[in-house]
């Protein structure tokens, strides 16, 4: 395994750990052993034993989300979706701006082929990544995490891997339906190809960002442009039909994705 792949693997492990830390459910402590048990429907799910003390405490001290209540929210108009989006973005932009103050990164707003992007450059760049660029596609159900919120994951990637990142602030729902987001990712990537070789770039994202990374590769193949040197897929949203069994059997295990809503 070459050096770049090792670093990518390390980054994936770190990012997956951050995502896993959001998984919570209801818990019950048995009087005999004090063991914490989670319940998904009628299925007991014990807390994993091979995790850190910090992660275990985080899981056991978080209340299970109310799946039934979350499932009641079903926006019926564009205005209701826009209100949901603006509310979520306001919270996440606040979190992003707080992180900007404490993480050792510089953030610069720019445009590539008319698409807003943010360059997130760590104060210290790993010598092995001085010629690399991580092209990050944010998650958020194609709806939220626009503006400054788009760099929440990018700042973690830049800090942990010590690699420059460009975050694509693609157009989102409900104002801009498919294929607006995909077109924005492809436009940015084509613009970057005029500045650097494809093999120097890593393309990827989490959730909806992972979906767009996969869809972009298919588009790159269709239009005949070279693939990036590496691909990162963090829990990609690959089933938009909600037909996978585990979307039902594990409902309530994740505190962020509850009742098929954006929280």
Image (spheres, rainbow, N blue to C red):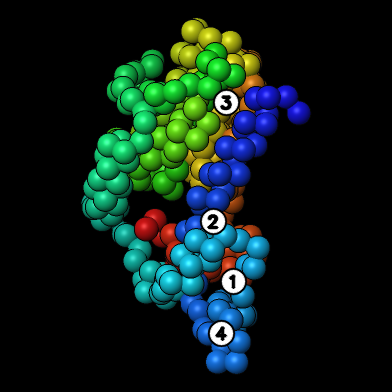
**Which residue is outermost to the top?**
194
Identify the residue under disc 4. Answer: 34
Q: Quadrant of residue 33?
A: bottom right
Give the vertical position of 177 relative to 260 (above or below). above
Whether the residues at callouts 1 and 4 have beta carbons within 8 Å, the answer is no
Q: Quadrant of residue 210?
A: top right
Residue 43: x and y, percent?
A: 62, 80
Residue, x 27% and y 42% (percent of image)? 98
Give the vertical position of 261 relative to 209 (above or below). below
Identify the residue under disc 2. Answer: 20
Question: Between residues 247 and 157, which one lies in front from this camera angle?
Answer: 157
Identify the residue under disc 1. Answer: 47
Instruction: Return the disc, 1 or 4, that comes first in the chain's sequence.
Output: 4
Instruction: Return the disc, 3 or 2, that comes first in the chain's sequence.
Output: 2
Instruction: Return the disc, 4 or 2, that comes first in the chain's sequence.
Output: 2
In the rendered view, does 24 fall on the left or right side of 175? right
Residue 211 in sight in this render: no
């Amino acid at each position: 395994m070459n050096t770049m792949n090792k670093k990518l693997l390390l980054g994936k492990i770190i990012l997956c750990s951050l995502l896993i830390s959001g998984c919570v459910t209801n818990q019950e402590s048995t009087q005999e052993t004090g063991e914490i048990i989670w319940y998904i429907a009628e299925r007991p799910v014990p807390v994993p034993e091979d995790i850190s003390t910090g992660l275990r405490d985080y899981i056991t001290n978080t209340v299970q989300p109310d799946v039934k209540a979350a499932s009641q929210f079903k926006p019926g108009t564009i205005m209701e979706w826009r209100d949901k989006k603006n509310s979520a973005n306001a919270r996440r932009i606040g979190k992003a701006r707080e992180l900007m103050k404490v993480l050792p990164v510089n953030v610069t707003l720019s445009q590539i082929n008319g698409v807003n992007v943010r360059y997130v450059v760590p104060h210290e760049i790993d010598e092995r990544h001085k010629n690399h660029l991580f092209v990050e596609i944010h998650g958020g159900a194609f709806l939220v995490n626009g503006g400054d919120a788009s760099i929440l994951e990018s700042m973690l990637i830049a800090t942990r891997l010590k690699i420059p990142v460009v975050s694509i602030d693609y157009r989102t729902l409900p104002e801009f339906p498919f294929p607006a987001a995909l077109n924005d990712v492809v436009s940015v990537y084509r613009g970057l190809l005029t500045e650097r070789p494809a093999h120097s770039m890593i393309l990827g994202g989490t959730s909806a960002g992972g979906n767009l990374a996969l869809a972009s590769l298919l588009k790159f193949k269709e239009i005949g442009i070279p693939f990036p040197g590496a691909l990162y897929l963090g829990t990609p949203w690959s089933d938009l039909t909600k037909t996978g069994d585990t979307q039902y059997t594990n409902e309530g295990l994740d505190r962020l994705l509850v009742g098929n809503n954006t929280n």
